[in-house]
Structures are given as C-alpha cells and as structure tokens.
Amino acid sequence: MKLTAVLDIGSSKVVCAAISPGARGALFLNGVGTCPYSGFYLGAMPKAGALSQAIATAIALCESESKIKISSICVGVPSPFTRTRITAARLESHFGGAKIADEDIDKLIHLSAPMNPPPGYELMHSTPFDYIINGSERVYDPIGMIAQSLEASVSHVYADNAFTEMLRCCLKGLGIETKLFISSAFADSHYIIPQNIRQCGSLLLDCGGNHCDISLIRGDAVFETISIGIGGNHITDDLAIRLRLPTEAAEELKRRYDFFDSDMLSYEQVFAPHEGYVSIKRSVIASIVRPRIEELGMYISDSIADLLTDTSYDLRIFLTGAGIAPLYGGMEYLSECIGMRIDSSLPPSAISEDEELPGRTSALALAHFILYEYCNTNRSDKRFGKKTIKQLMMNNS
C-alpha cells in the first residue's frame, strides 16, 4: 500500500495525516491528528516550544489512529513564510524550428533562475506558466509542438530558512525525516481549483484561525500572495470578550450562528462553566459576528485590487481553511461583502461527510500532490506533473 504522511502547519493548529490513494484518484484517510497551539500571526515566527509540542502531539495522535509508525513526512509551508520571484526565459531554435520536449522546459526553468533570490530563504519549487511560442502564440502545454522559439514566465517559491530549520530540528528530535517542503498555497490551488480555471487565472482565499492568505494563481503557478491579519479566531475572541464567555463557549456560539437566519428576536443558549446555560439574543450575536466579517471583506477587497493590475479581469475566487468555511452562510455573506462570488470547490477525491474537512483540506491537498503528482513521474499527462516534479526533486534533495 502506497502511503504518505503529511504535516500541515496552520496559523492556529497543526494537522498530521496518514493518507493512501483510493479508487479513481480518491484519498483514504488512515489516521489524522490535530493539535491547537498559540500559532503565528502574519510573518512572526511561532514559538518553537509551542510548535514542537503541537507537532509531537498531532503526530502521536495520527500514529495512534492509523496504527502506522511515521518515519518520514512531507510538510506544507504557510504563505507568510514563503517568498515568490517571477522571472522569464526564452529559448531559440537555430534550425528553423524544433519539437519542444521536457528537456526544453527544464532549460527554461534553469535559465530563469533569479539573479536576486530572497536572502535567508531556500528554493522549494519552480513552476513555468504563460508559455509563448514563436513570439506571439500563447499556449498552456507546449510539449510536442514545433516552434522556432519558446518563452515562459516562471514562479520560484522560496521558504524561510528559519522556519524550515525549526521544523527540521523538531522532526529530527522525533526520529522523523523531513522528506519535502511544499508551499501550502501551491498544493491547495491544484487540489481545490479546477485545471481549466487555473489556466485562465484565479484567486485562492485561505482563511484560517489567525489570518487569511490571498494568492493569485496563474496557470499552475503561485504568482503572488498577500496575508491579512484577521481569521476565524478573531470572531471567537469578539464573542468571548463582548459576551464575557469562555473561549470554548464563544467558539460553539460562533459555529452555531446562521447568516441566513432572519429571526433576530429569538435566543441562543450556550453552556458556560460556573454559570450554567446562558441565553443570548440572536440580534446581539449578529451585531458582533457580522462587523468582523465585513471588516475582513474590506481588507480582502483592497488586497484583490493590489493583486490585480487589471481590475476589469473577472477572476474566480475559491475559499479554503477553517476560519470562515464551516460557518453557516459565512462564505455567502463574505461574497456579499466583497461584491464577488466565492466558490468552495472540493474535487471528488475529497473525503465526504467529514465535519472537520475545512480544517483538513490543506493536509489532503499535500497528500494528493505527493501521491498523484510527485510520486508518479511516469504518468502520461506531462502538462503539470513531470516538469514541476523534476524541479521539486532537485530543490529538495
């Protein structure tokens, strides 16, 4: 049985999952472990002790549930600890035209190596996009075409050395080899966004506990990412502070709130230790929850305007993460706030009927990439896998 272990480092929790391939490209979850921790805020490094303890706990829970001893693991790097450089390269044929092969894509990637890589960062992967043949014809997959010239843009994604070294040390202490680092936005976009939509350009909105990351996706590549310091935990904190509730009770109240509910005169009951059940008017809950979503929507709108030089270009937006997606009507209300439709699209390979799915999506995305792209270098579809996998192997060797 082919199996991979993955580690998703979220802004407020760590998820470890042992996943094997299922029928027709599906995923089988052998075991999963989740552990909350103090997290990180934007680009501030998480506390080493808290992160190490959370990783150890999540891995132990996953091993216990799956009955599998984890010896190596693939790690997703969250966007605040990544940097992207976009470069371009061009190849010329001196024989009046030649058939484009995989080796030409490799040459493009190497020729596009940035002259000024970000200091203190290590290269994770390089992905070509926006291919142009013969100086004018834009194509998605140039392999096999005959052309006099081939040019492309290349997305080079780097990881913060301090962050990856912290993770390597933690995992080494647990006797686990760090097999591969992958940008979480890179893996998420390929798992969540259909290929034909990625080809035209799209936006990935990853809303977690402590912050939201908005990534512009071009073809198979991460073009640019902006992070916003607001997430689902801020809604919980607002409820806890304003209503003087314990965090657990506030989180329960948030999860039960329905944005579609128009009955603002009735009450919700929530249990608070030492006080028993507390009745809270729904209009009061709405007056706390909705303004925070509206504030997030304002920042998202501003970030999208910064990401898109051509604001008339209508890109599809896809939502992931456990900050907003699990809330009843939360995605739809956020759509109203930004004036753009937001989709939540999971492929058939997603594990169905899983209440914790929004918080596990990034782990599933990592596993799907490893099992169906990275490990399968001989597959016939070379439009994405082979030319990018080669670079991943070189960069992570």
Image (cartoon, helix red, strand yellow):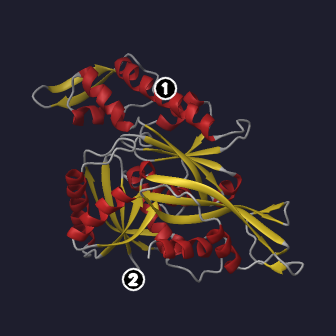
Up the image or down, 365 lies above or below 269; here it is: below
SS at circle 1: helix
Q: Give the left or right position of residue 381, taking residue 255 as reference.
A: right
Residue drawn 67% across and 74% down? 107
Up the image or down, 55 lies above or below 280; here it is: below
Nearer the observer, 112 or 23: 112
Q: Give the left or right position of residue 63, taking residue 358 as reference.
A: left
Residue drawn 78% across and 69% down? 150
- Residue type, numbered disc 1: Glu
When asked about the image quadrant of residue 367, the answer is: bottom left
Q: Could you say which disc has been placed on residue 332 in the image?
A: none
Q: Residue 244 in the image: x percent, y percent? A: 21, 23
Nearer the observer, 201 or 330: 201
Q: Residue 348 in the image: x percent, y percent? A: 54, 62
Residue wearing tag 1:
294
Q: Could you say which disc has been placed on residue 1 in the image?
A: 2
Is residue 4 visible to the viewer in this orientation of the structure? Answer: yes
SS at circle 2: loop
Up the image or down, 1 lies above or below 265; here it is: below
